[in-house]
Image: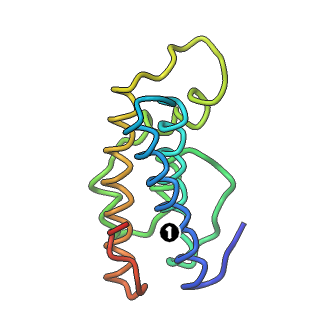
Amino acid sequence: MSHEGEAGSSRWLDHATSDLEAAAVLLASDVGAGAACFLAQQSVEKALKGALVHAGADVPRIHNLDTLRNLLPDGWAAKEEFPDLAELTAWAIESRYPGDWPQPSIDDARTAVDVARAVVASIADELAARGLEGSDGEG
C-alpha cells in the first residue's frame, strides 16, 4: 500500500485526527468504550502510516503499532517517546470481536485515547517540522 508524497501524508494524518476526534466523542458520552479504544488504535495506526509515507517508505497492511513505529527512519521522536504500543495495538482486535478477554472499560478507553492523543500529536509535530503544512498536532 502506498500513497504518494506530501498529499498522501496529509490525508493519512487527516484520517488519524478524525478517528481521534470520534474516539474522544465516544469517550465523553460514556458509551461505546470498545469503539473508542478501536478508534484510538486506528488514529495511531494512520498517523504512523502517514509518517511512513512522508519518509518515502512502503506502508504495510498491518495493524501492529510497534512494528509500524519501528519502520520509521531513525530520528523520529515517536520511536523514542513511545517504545511500547502493544496495549493500544490490542484494541485493533479485542475491542471489535468477542473473545477470551474482558470488554473494554471506560478507563481502558480513557487510557487509549490519552495515549493516542500523545502519539498523534508527536507525529503531527514531527511532520510539521519536516515541512508538511497544516500538521501542527492540533485537531
Residue sitting at the far front = 29
Residue sitting at the far right = 1
Left/right placement of residue 52 relative to residue 80 reads: right
- Image point (54%, 76%), residue name: 9
- Image point (38%, 49%), residue name: 116
Q: Amino acid at mark 1?
A: Leu
Q: Quadrant of residue 108?
A: top left
Mark 1 surroundings: few (<14), some (14-19) or many (≥20) residues within 10 A: many
24 in relation to 136, above or below: above
Of residues 50 and 37, which is closer to you in this image? 37
66 in relation to 73, above or below: above
31 in relation to 70, above or below: above
Left/right placement of residue 59 relative to residue 68 reads: right
Q: Which residue is mark 1?
A: 13
- Image point (32%, 76%), residue name: 136
Mark 1 lies on a secondary structure that is helix
Where, quadrant-wise, is the C terminus in this rendering? bottom left
**Residue 53 percent across, percent down from the top left:** 57, 74
**Residue 34 percent across, percent down from the top left:** 52, 30
139 in relation to 6, above or below: above
Where, quadrant-wise, is the N terminus in this rendering? bottom right
Q: Quadrant of residue 5?
A: bottom right
Left/right placement of residue 56 relative to residue 131 reads: right
**Residue 92 percent across, percent down from the top left:** 58, 37
- Image point (31%, 44%), residue name: 114
**Residue 77 percent across, percent down from the top left:** 30, 65
